[in-house]
Amino acid sequence: MKNIKKIIVYTLMLSFSHVLYAWLPTNVYRPDATIMRLHLANNAKWSLGFFFERGSSSDAENINGRSRNVLAVHDDTQSVISMLENPIQSSKKTDIEDLFNRFIAQVGPTTNDGVRGNVKFFGDYEQTQITLFGDYKFNISFIPGTMALALYMPFVNKEVESIHFEDQTKGNFGTERFLQQEVINNLVSNVETLGDLKLDAWNESGVGDTVVMLEWMHDVLVHDKKTRKARKSAERGVQDYVKNFTVLAKLGISVPSGTDTQEDFAFSLPLGNDDAWGFPGGIAVNVDFIKYFRAGVYLDFLYLLNYSRVFRMKTHVEQTEFLLLNKGRAEKNPGFIWDFGVYFHVINILKGLSFKTSYHYAKKHEDKLFSRDPEFSNDIINTTNSLKGSESHSLTFHFGYDFQFEKKQWRFAPELSIFYKMPLSGESVADMHTFGGKLGVSF
C-alpha cells in the first residue's frame, strides 16, 4: 500500500508540477511524440513502422485567441503604406522612397489605421506528415530497466493555397485613388519589384528534421497474478487493481535536415526547425491496471540552439508580417518548446481492439532576433507578432488493434491504429482537425 501511495503521488507531481507544453507550427504531432510510441511485444528488441497525420484549415486563432483566417493569424490586415517606410540601403531603396514620398505629398505624415492602405489576406493551409521510426532495445548491467536507441525521420508536405486579398481602403478621394491605382491594384507585381518578394501560393515537400533519441524505460511490478489470487477479497486494496507502473525518460538530438524558410516567398514555412539544431527530450509515467485499462501522463520538450541567417525584418513598428521588403542577417534565439499530455486507454475491448483518448497542450515560447546588420533596430524587429509564441489545446481519439493481445507469446507483433484530433483552443495557431494512423511491428 505504501508503494502504491508513492506511485500515485509521483504521478500527480509529474502531472502538475511540470505544467504543461510543446509547440508545433500547427497542432500536428512532433516526429518523436511520446503518445505515438508503440507498445512493444513481449521480449521484443526491435520495432519498426510509420505514423502519418494530415489536416487542412482556413481558420486560425490569433494572438488573442480570436478566430481569424490562417493568413490573418498574426495581423488582421497588411499595411501597404507602412511597408514603404524606412527602406534600407539597396538597389531598390530609391524606388521605394520615391513611391512613399509621392504618397506623403498627397496626404502628409500618416499612421497605419488598419483601413486606409491596408489589405486583408485570405487563404487555406494544408499539411501532411509521414514519420518513419525504428528503435532497438538493449540493457546495461549497471542501469536498472531497459535502454532504447530510436530514430525518427519525417517526410512533410505543407501548402498555402487559394490566396487572395481584399482592399480595405474606403472612399474614392484623391488619396484613396492614388493608393489603389499606384500600389494596391498591382500589389503582387509591386511587392516583387520593390522587395523581390513573392505573394504567390506556396508548397514544399521533403524530409523534415531527423531525430535520434536515447530512451530509458523501467517497469515496477506492483503485484503478479499469483500474489493477487492469494489475497482474500476482503483484504484487497488499491494495489490489487494496479498491475504495472512504467517510467520513461528520453533525451536526443534534432538534426536540421528539413528545408528552411524561403525568405523570398511571403507564405513559406520551414519543413523542420528552420536550420536550428535541437535537443528533444521528455518524461512519461504509465500505469497498467489489472484488466482493460491503462493511463498515463507525459511531458515532451525541445530546446533549440541559436542560429544565424538572412531574415526579412521590420524597419518600422507598424509594418506587417507578409509585406516586409527589407532583408538582413540576424541571429535567432528560438523559444523553448514543450508539450504536456494525459491519456486514458481501454485495452482489449474485443480481442486486441482498443480505444484511447488523449488531451494535448502545446506551447512555444517567444523567439528573439538579434540583428547583425546596423540598418536594423533590435527593438523594432522584435515587434513582429510571429515571434511572440504560440499555444494549442486539442483532444485526440485513437482506435487500435494490437496483435500481441491475441497471441501474448508472439515475438513478432503488428500494431495498427487510426486517430482523429479535434482542436479546442489556442493562440497564434491554425485550427486544424487532423486525422492519421500508425502501423508498426515489434520483434
Image (cartoon, helix red, strand yellow):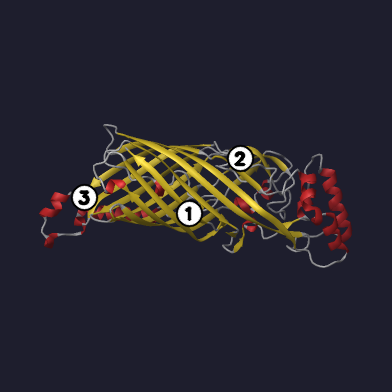
Q: Which mark is residue 260?
A: 2
| Mark 1 crowdedness (10 Å alpha carbons): few <14, some 14-19, many ≥20 | some
Mark 2 vs 1, N-terminal side: 2
Q: Position of residue 389 (x, y in %)?
A: 56, 52
| Furthest residue in direction top, as rendered | 141
Q: Nearer the viewer, residue 140 or 3?
A: 140
What secondary structure is found at the residue carrying circle 3?
loop
Question: What residue is rendered at 32% in x and 48% in y?
Answer: 402
Mark 3 vs 1, N-terminal side: 3
Amino acid type at mark 3: Val
Apparent side of residue 323 relative to residue 331 in the rendered image (left or right): right
Q: Position of residue 275 (x, y in %)?
A: 58, 38
In this view, the mark in front (2 or 1)? 1
Question: What residue is rendered at 65% in x and 58% in y?
Answer: 72
Amino acid type at mark 1: Phe
**Residue at the disc numbered 3:** 222
